[in-house]
Structure formats: C-alpha cells, structure tokens
Image (cartoon, rainbow, N blue to C red):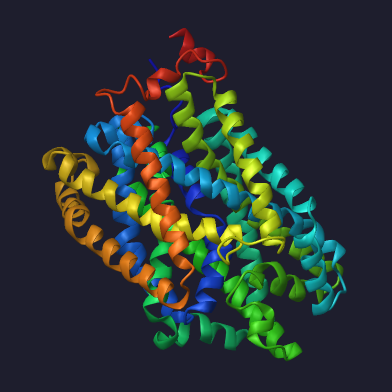
Amino acid sequence: MKKHNGFASSLGFVLASAGSAVGLGNIWGFPYKTGANGGAAFVLVYILMALLLGIVGMTVEMYVGKRAQANPVTAVKKINSKIGFVGLLSVIVPFFIICYYSVLGGYTMRGIVSSFTDIGKDAAGVSAGLSDFMANPWLPALCTFLFLGLAVFIIMGGVQKGIEKASKVLMPLLFIILLGVMIYSLCLGEGVKAGLDFYILKADFKALGFKGVAAAMGQVFFSMSLGMGIMITYGSYTGKEINLFKSAVQISLIDTAIALMAGFAIFPAAFHFMEVEGIAASEVGLGGFALMFMTLPLVFNSLGTVGGIIGAFFFLMVTIAAITSVVSLVEVVTQFFIQKFRISRKRAAVLPMILALAISIPVSLSLGGHFTLFGFDLLTFFDEITNTVLMPVTALCVCVAAGFGIKRREFEDNIYVGKPIVGRIISFMARFVTPLLILVVAIFGIYSNVSVNVNYFAVINTAFLLAAVAFAVYFLSLVRVGDTDTGCNADELGYEGDADPADAAE
C-alpha cells in the first residue's frame, strides 16, 4: 500500500518544513529583534543558537514524529504514556500562535494594497494610514479572516496535494522576490554602509545583554518551528527514505539564509531613509513593530509608482512566508482533530479555526489600542506566553524524553542511517547539551523580563496555567495506554477528503 497522506519526496518534505520555518519570524521578527538587541551581536548569537539548538531540536522532534507515524500526543505517548501531556501542549501552543499570527498575516495582506494607496505620502501620512488601519474595528479582522481562510483552504487539500504542492510553488517564489528586494536595498546609496555596519560589522554586546541572548534563543524556536508540534507532525509524514539529520541541516540553512537576507533587505533601506530624511532610529521603528510596516513603505513610496510595485512585491513575499508558516500551525491542530475525533480533514481544519478566528478578533482590536491585558496588547501577551515560556518548556521536555526515553541504539541508528557517529553526537546533544542550554537561557530570559516589568508575572502564570490544563485534560481523558484514544496517521484512511482514490483502492 502507498504511504497514506505523507510527503511524496524528500524535496517536498524539506520545502514544506522550510516553509513552516520561514515566515514572519524571519522577515519581520528577526530584523526588528536585531535592531533592538545590538545589531551584529544579536546576529552572531542567533547563528550560534541555530547550530546548538535549532538543528538538534529539529532532528529530535522530526524523529519523534517519524517513529510514531502519529500526531504529537500519540508520538510522545509512545515514548512514555506518563508524559503524553507534553504532546497535548504541543497542540495547544500552535493554536494560540495561530490566534495572533493570523492577525500579522492580515497586516501583510494590507501592505500589498497600501503599497499603491500610500504612493507619494510622507512619514506622517504613512504613519497615519497604518494607525487608522490598526484602530479600525473591522478592517484588520477582515484581513485576518482572508489570511486564515487561505491557509485552511491549502490544508484541506491534504499533505501531498495541499501542503507539499503549495510549498513547491511558494518557497521558490518567496526566495526570488526576497533576492530582488535585497539587491534593490543594497543599491540605494546613502545610508547603506551605515546599515551594513549596524547589521553585520559592529557588534554591540552591551546592547545585547542576557535579555538579547534569550531573545535570540526564542527567535530560533519560533523561526525553526520548535516546541510547537510542527516538526513532530511533519516528521510523522516521512518514510524511511528521508534522512532526518540531513533534512534538518538543509531546513536550518534555508531558514537562516532567509532571515539574513531579510536583514540585508531591511537595514540598508531603513538607514537610507534615516540618513536621507534625517529621522531618528526610534521614529522609523528600528527595534519594533513598525520596522517592516512603516519604514520600508516610506522608502518604496519615495520612488513613486515603481516603488509602489516593488513594495507590493515585498509584501506579497511576506504574505507568502506567513502563509507557509500558518499552514504548518493549522496542520498540527488538524492532524490531532482528525485522529482523535475520527472526522474528515475538512471538518478538522475548519472547526478549530473558527474558534481561532474568534480569538483573533480581540487580538486585532487590542493591537489597535482598544484595550490591554496586564499592560500588554494581546498579540504581545500571547507571543510572550508561547515564545518565551511554553515553546522552550515543550522543546526541553521532548528533547529529554527522546534522549532518555528512546533506546540509545535505536535513536542513534535512525537519526542518520549509515553514519552512526552522527547519531551518537545528536544523542549526546539531545540528552545533555541542548536541554541544559535551553534551561539556562530560558530561566535567565524570564528573569530579565520580570526584572524590568513586574506585569511579566502575569505572562508566566498564564503560561503555566495552560500547561496545567494540558496536564489535567491528558490524565483525565487521554492517558490510557496505547494510541487507540488519540489515533495515528493510519486512522485517516477512509475519511472523506483525506485519502487519494488510488490509496483507497489499494
């Protein structure tokens, strides 16, 4: 029988996984966090974290999924049923990320249109247009609905015909557009050298601090889709022919390259505008939300109609990156719903996303300044809960569970078939080095946030409340030994809209 609902090729798996990893975290998050945390110093620490955390964590999570051929809950249960709640947390985390990530995705769609409507406007005009959009009670929600709807549509097509097919088209297109924007930004002239100095040449470790190191770790987790069930889910759709470690290296290289290219596209443009217009870094949003949504549009607008076209392509690229990422988040939730509740892929994709859309509406309203929670807008609040607390906790637990819960020989032999030395290195890293690094950086990162904002305790308490809910739900209803209650990939056979006719015939 053909492998049901799995990736058809190694290339498809790598591109789909890279599509998950490459998103707003690379093109928006990485540049603005670089701007806020010492420029080149942050870039250096990020690359080190990608090597020590990203590749190891990704390889481990993919193997946990591949080994079980099932959703994250069942996959972790197959290591040890007593820690299966970690798998449930791996489903809860992406759901909450969807609730705010889709709002940002809506903003990128708005950017495509505003690239033309803002032509000729000065800084005040562009800022006013963005502020009006954010303050509008329904336009951001409408853009969020369109963005999330597109992601659900792709998910309905299944793994091969939906996720894999879309990734093979969207990822190369994203790279081509980003390359074009990067070359354009590097040719702007004035300010470009200052931008490159800040970005890659002059490392300010004093500005970085331990908070910046924690931010780099969090960026690696978010950008490489760690601690949110994605790599477990995608790993479950792989067969024996796919080399996990080799794939993890390829995905990490693509992800890091896109992030670095985004920096080369944004910082020369930002410094060009600062030098030409004489505006301070704080006013162009060098270390914050406005870096992509205001600074670059100002540069594009100065070029008239041509700039509008370039800006539209840039935001099209960002939207593509966001779509490929949110598709992977939705797939984690969809896979669990299919296998747990034995429903069709279409229902499993739509039902939880209706709830996510309902939650995203107050998130968009909060981002527009309509209300706050514990002093945070909801986007920041959800981002801190998932990115700073739950994702490192989940990745840590999965790493330790795989390192100590799976027989070492089995683990080492399957990480890189034919090269056991690679498996031994990854096994050692997974058991000792990576968990310790996650733990140290996460603890000091949380401490740094609490020390400057006492309201951060609300973030920590909410995060651990969600973990407690996952713990309680798991032991009340999902802990039974075996996977009959939480399902596996084979359970998708025969459900309407899930199986290819050829597969069903066999």
Q: Can see residue 325?
A: no
Q: Can see residue 128?
A: yes
Residue 20 % position (x, y): 50, 48
* Residue 181 lies in quadrant: bottom right
User: Looking at the figure, which quarter contains the N terminus?
Assistant: top left
Q: Residue furthest top?
A: 505
Q: How many marks are shown on the rendered structure? A: 0
Q: Nearer the viewer, residue 371 or 403?
A: 371
Q: Is residue 432 left or right of residue 451?
A: left
Residue 211 % position (x, y): 40, 75
Q: Nearer the viewer, residue 430 or 184?
A: 430
Q: Is residue 219 left or right of residue 418?
A: right
* Residue 295 lies in quadrant: bottom right
Residue 431 % position (x, y): 18, 53
What residue is at 42 percent from the left and 38 percent from the top?
234
What residue is at 27 percent from the left and 62 percent from the top?
439
What residue is at 35 percent from the left and 21 percent from the top?
485
Q: Nearer the viewer, residue 315 or 479?
A: 479
